[in-house]
């Protein structure tokens, strides 16, 4: 069995051959642009839209961040026994995910419009907006913040205008100038102390 940690350089070429003919990824990629190895890209762009890692003898998948813009992803027919939901954090555009039958859809079934199970594949289709499910203000987001989807089952909280800091509790503009002055002053002081210490060591020798 092949155990692989997916890296940027090998993502599209980690399996022999190209996208499986007549697969869901193959049908999607035919109309979307250029195909390279196991990936397809939108014309003239470098973002991976489709990724077919099916039947690659993978026992572990640790990193797919290079495919975070993917619309369709196939990991079926692999002996993967465990898959962290965090692998799909930031996959906002993912609308079709094919997994080995023993794995659950990331975020749970409630994060998808449709979950279909066949004898050897689990299909997670139509990623739902977690923020829409529980209202614009997510229960996971603090007051004075806006909820935005961040992959299946994940949300991202951004402070609304004029609020910043921990849990968006500070009101007003972030004091960038004051912070830069403090950091700059601290750097000068530390540098001066180190310079004086070094000079004393040189004189002592």
Image: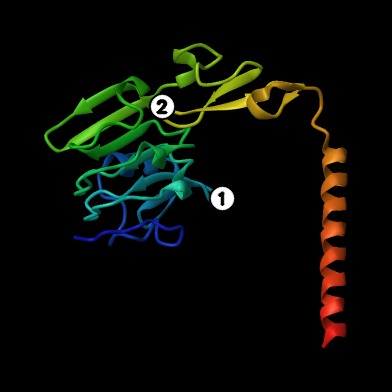
Q: Is residue 83 above or below residue 96?
A: below
Q: Which residue is mark 1?
A: 44
| Residue 33 visible in image | no
The residue at 24%/55% (across/down) is 56
Secondary structure beneath dot 1 equals: loop
In the depicted view, which residue is nearer to us: 194 or 45? 194
Please state the horizontal and vertical placement of residue 11, each as a whole percent of the image: 40, 56
In the depicted view, which residue is nearer to us: 150 or 140? 140
Q: Is disc 2 surrounded by few (<14), some (14 to 19) or many (20+) residues within 10 Å? A: many
The residue at 61%/20% (across/down) is 146
Please give the label number shown on residue 121.
none
Please state the horizontal and vertical placement of residue 109, each as a whole percent of the image: 30, 23
> Which residue ends up furthest to the top in the rendered image?
135
Which colour style is shown? Answer: rainbow
Please give the label number shown on residue 153.
2
Please state the horizontal and vertical placement of residue 83, each as a whole percent of the image: 30, 42
Task: Tell me which label, 1 or 2, sits earlier in the chain.
Answer: 1
Q: Is residue 99 left or right of residue 140?
A: left
Secondary structure beneath dot 2 equals: loop
Structural distance between the alpha carbons of marks 1 and 2 = 31 Å
Position of the N terminus, as image quadrant, is: bottom left
The residue at 86%/77% (across/down) is 200
Is label 1 or label 2 in front? 2
Q: Is residue 18 left or right of residue 202?
A: left
């Amino acid at each position: 069995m092949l155990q692989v940690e997916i890296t940027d350089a090998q993502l599209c070429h980690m399996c022999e051959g190209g996208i499986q003919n007549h697969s869901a990824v193959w049908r999607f990629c035919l109309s979307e642009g250029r195909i390279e190895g196991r990936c397809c890209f939108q014309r003239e762009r470098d973002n991976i839209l489709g990724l077919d890692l099916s039947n690659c003898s993978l026992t572990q998948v640790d990193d797919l961040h290079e495919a975070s813009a993917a619309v369709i992803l196939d990991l079926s027919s692999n002996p993967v026994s465990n898959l962290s939901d965090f692998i799909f954090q930031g996959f906002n555009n993912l609308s079709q995910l094919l997994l080995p039958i023993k794995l659950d859809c990331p975020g749970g079934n409630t994060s998808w419009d449709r979950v279909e199970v066949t004898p050897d594949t689990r299909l997670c289709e139509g990623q739902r907006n977690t923020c829409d499910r529980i209202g614009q203000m997510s229960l996971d987001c603090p007051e004075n913040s806006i909820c935005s989807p961040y992959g299946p089952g994940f949300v991202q909280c951004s402070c609304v205008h004029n609020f910043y800091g921990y849990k968006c509790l500070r009101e007003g503009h972030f004091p960038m100038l004051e912070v830069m002055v403090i950091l700059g002053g601290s750097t000068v002081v530390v540098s001066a102390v180190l310079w004086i210490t070094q000079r004393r060591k040189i004189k002592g020798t």
